[in-house]
Amino acid sequence: MNVNDTTSAAVLEELRRRPADRRRILFTGATIVTMDPDLGVINGGDLLVEGDTITAVGRHLDADGAVVVDATGTILTPGFVDTHRHAWQAQLRRIMPDVDDLGGYVMSTLAGYATVYRPEDMYIGTRLAALTAIDSGITTMLDFSHNSRTREHSDAAIEALVDTGIRGVHAAMGPHFGEWDRQWPGDLTRLKDQYFRSSEQLLTLRLATLATDEIAGPVLAYGPELARVAEELGIGVSVDAVFGTSSSEAVLRWAKDGILSPDVTLIHSTGLTSEAWKAMGGTGTTVALAPTSDAQIGLETAIPAVDEALAVGIRPGLSIDVEVALASDMFTQMRALHAIQRMRAVHAAYGTDNQLLRITTHDVLDFATLQGAHTNGLAGVTGSLTPGKKADLLVIQAEDLNNMPLNDPIGTIVLGSDARNISAVLINGEPRKWDGHVLDIDLNALRNEVHASREYVLNASAT
């Protein structure tokens, strides 16, 4: 078995010689973790991609006319889905790794660095975040773009997503502080007409907003007026900073006003009351957890609300949040949530006869894939290796030093793997990472752009 041949340069060359819309790729001999409840895990399985779509999953599939990729010794899994990341900040990643609290982040980043961003800085940060996401196996990223100071800032963030080839969700919001054109939310109509005209494209649009007016005033706070804007445009809503007593009260108001639904995602949802959770569960509202953000920044209880979500029938998605203080990858989010929840469960039962209710590695992989897609309004498109869905998938080397021997594929993905084990990433059937390298980028040129943008932002915000 020579797993190095799995994603060889020769195979890539053959793939790229064929027109994308008529291309057939057959992966053979893999351990396929479909994350489809009906298909489960297929050992020694085959997966067929035709154009941008998965058309068959099983064993001994017909290879007629296909580029055959020998995937023996690998795991095929759906690409991860990030339900909330402030991508524009990427050139400032880990600039404040030991942030003390939310106020420290808000004042340094949103009231400081953000106010001097130019459209080109939006483009560079968003592109860097998206390319990093692809490298670590995230094929869908919701960019909560809350620094849209002008139309040009919004355009730059969207164009960065387009240029990387990621399945991107642009969630647009005006900035918290500083001067801006007050073009949001009115500019959403132009954005939809200009960039989001087709349901078949990689990008989708959402309205981004905040839970309450505590941080940035009433203009950015979710309520009937913004809900009406989203409904008229036919787009979903992502609500950030949902935590604590004031957000719990807001959730109950939204439920009473009839503006909670499966098209609305509440981000964090930390420290909410049981009444708020009941309202969320009763309306089918989705939830995006940010496990490391809650714990590291110390949001309300600092405990990711997975138990509260599951108790009312909500299976949450997972998210990265802010790279200024946090890790960039989904492996970290899965492991953090898995460890925190199981720690809480064992601690609560210690010294008692209470039954332990512990989540599993399958649960967190489900949150990171299929439930993330559901949270982003894309469950019919991505999130599982189901025939008919788009070909967003990862090839993970199961025989690498840190993964062999393969005993449990889901456990290996969640607890053993990292970005170095991802030899290939396909998005919409198109190779975006191959032989362990993100494709079609000039890394030196990107590095120069990132450093120049960072220096500009740091110098301009210091004056």
Image: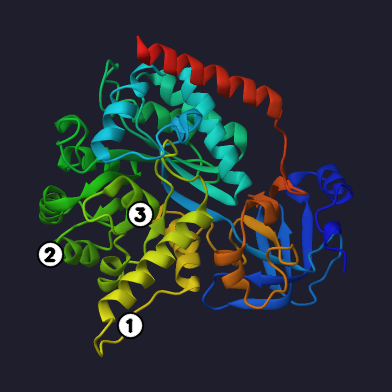
Residue 135 in the figure: left or right of residue 89? right
Amino acid identity at mark 2: Glu
| Residue at far top of view | 463
* Residue 251 position (above or below residue 40): above
Q: Residue at x 63, y 45 (%)?
A: 135
Amino acid identity at mark 3: Ala
Residue 423 in the figure: left or right of residue 277? right
Q: Position of residue 370 (x, y in %)?
A: 48, 63
The alpha-carbon separation of the residues under discs 3 and 2 comes to 19 Å
The residue that mark 1 highlights is: 356
The alpha-carbon separation of the residues under discs 1 and 3 comes to 24 Å
**Image quarter of residue 101:** top left
Q: How is the image coloured?
A: rainbow
| Residue at far bottom of view | 353
For the N terminus, the quadrant is: bottom right
Q: Position of residue 249 (x, y in %)?
A: 10, 52
Q: Residue at x 60, y 49 (%)?
A: 136
